[in-house]
Image (cartoon, rainbow, N blue to C red):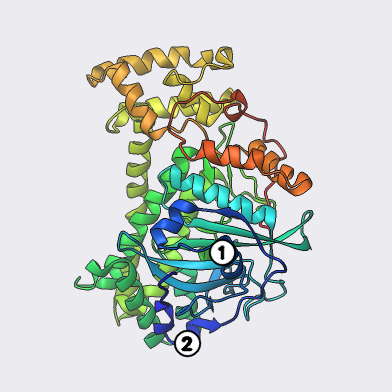
Amino acid sequence: MINFDNQYTKLPDTFYQLVTPTPIVQPKIHLWNDDLAHKLGINITDEAKADYFSGIKTFEKSTPLAMAYAGHQFGHFTMLGDGRAILLGDVTTDEGKTVDVQLKGSGITPFSRRGDGRGTLSSMLREYLISEAMHALHIPTSRSLAVVGSNEKIIRQFVDEKAVLTRTASSFIRVGTFEYAANFQDKESLQSLFDFTLQRHYPQLLSEENPAMSFLQTVIKQQVKLVVHWMRVGFIHGVMNTDNITVSGETIDYGPCAFMNVYHPQTVFSSIDENGRYSFGNQASINLWNMSCLAGTLLPLIDANEKIAIDSAEQMLNTYPALFKQEYNEMMANKVGFTQAHEEVNQLVHNLLELMQNNQLDYTNTFLYLSDDYTEDKAKYQVLDLWKTTWAKALANENISMEAAKKSMRKVNPFVIPRNNLVENALREVREKNDFSAYKQLQQILSTPYDRKLIDNKYLQSEDDFGYQTFCGT
């Protein structure tokens, strides 16, 4: 049926609590990811899907547990842990990769604090839609296997149906997991977590002269690449607390996330981010802050001499700004058709972003307009015509034809993104009418985001996001 293991139980038992999922009443499969199920080797009946992925039944060899971790939430350190998620175990895919399988919304755990351990159908459908869209956008991410609903109701922002999401990731080890080990456990436990993490994600680092330093460097690079990917498509995570940042470099925890329409660096949608800490333009600096938290946990493993350890960690963290700048500049150069970044291209991009901000242009559609893929509201984008003349000259100076530039642009600039109004409308249709047609149509369109295709213009139109808010669903 499915060959489960749970390697996480090899860690000291202080890193988790064994817990049994609390089943939901009369479970029913709303969504099932055939592609992911095939990769995981899952081939079961619809009835079995509902039973196993709602918590009624437990797979053989599965050892359900809630992971312990801490984290800085909006800069404030606190003890946390899986409050509404239960790790079923890990599975080896048909490609030989190990992935964790987790239920979300599966009931109270020892870490639930004052929560009920449940989730709404809307929040689970939202995570399924966005995480799979991110996967299609070629961005490292957790993936969604199933959404199981019920006949029970739950009150959050709206009265909604209780639901359970099944999601996978290469692991759910977070910066916050290391913070938990460093602050609440002994050095031996920290070493156990470190060794386990390297075996799982970076076995090549085990033979390095200073594995802890190499690990810090590797995670920094992975996180830089991830956030640059987010900025490439206008994604705003919304809650970049250290407990939501993986050491594998994957995007997890799609709560108040959203995609930016009109370009503005300070765009923020999360209802709990009142000061814009996690706005679109702040994601790079917050990422560095999170990496400094990780570095702090590794000090005992870097060197027995604390001063040497701190100096070494600081030197590594000091490489972040230049690394991010390089990755970001190359990404933005690619978005306008160049193969590499240099000062002239960087200035060209800066001028473009300034024009976009001053004229309230849509982030995604601006790049589609430049590559002739989007012509609606063409008059609005004519403010870019003088910039386009400079752009054409710069491409010519690089011996890049306009045709070649536009062809390469289509590989990195998505045609469609999960626009907020479309996501909200699809979720509302399900919640109020039990109608999944708009949701599934949107899901299908987002599965091939780089394809230039004939679709309803509503999927491309920019919307005014002023006042729009997203919520965690907890």
Residue 441 % position (x, y): 59, 37
Write down the residue under mark 2: 13
Q: Are dots 2 and 1 in contact, CB under 8 Å?
A: no
Q: Is residue 249 visible?
A: no
Q: Secondary structure at mark 2?
A: helix
Query: Measured along the vertical axis of the image, is residue 163 above or below residue 183?
Result: above
Mark 2, residues whose alpha carbon is within 10 Å: few (<14), some, or many (≥20)?
Answer: few
Q: Residue at x 60, y 69 (%)?
A: 51
- Report x, y in % for residue 184: 51, 83
Determine whether, in the image, residue 220 is placed left or right of residue 29: left
- Kindly identify the residue that appears in the image at 56 percent across and 64 percent down: 49
Residue 170 versus residue 331 in the image, above or below: below
Quadrant in the rendering for residue 397? top left
Quarter of the image where one finds residue 197: bottom left
In primary-sequence order, the first of circles 2 and 1 is 2
Between the C-alphas of marks 2 and 1, the distance is 30 Å
Instruction: Specify the quadrant that holds the N terminus.
Output: bottom left
Q: Where residue 205 sits: x, y (%)?
A: 24, 68
Pointer 1 local density, CA inside 10 Å: few below 14, some 14–19, many at least 20: many
Residue for badge 1? 49
Residue positioned 67% across, 71% down in the render: 117
Q: Quadrant of the C terminus?
A: bottom right
Mark 1 residue element = helix
Total marks in image:
2
What residue is drawn where x is 22% and y is 19%?
Answer: 399
Q: Amino acid at mark 1?
A: Lys
Give the left or right position of residue 188, taking residue 267 as reference.
left
Tag 2: residue type?
Answer: Asp
Would you identify the image quadrant in which residue 379 lies?
top right
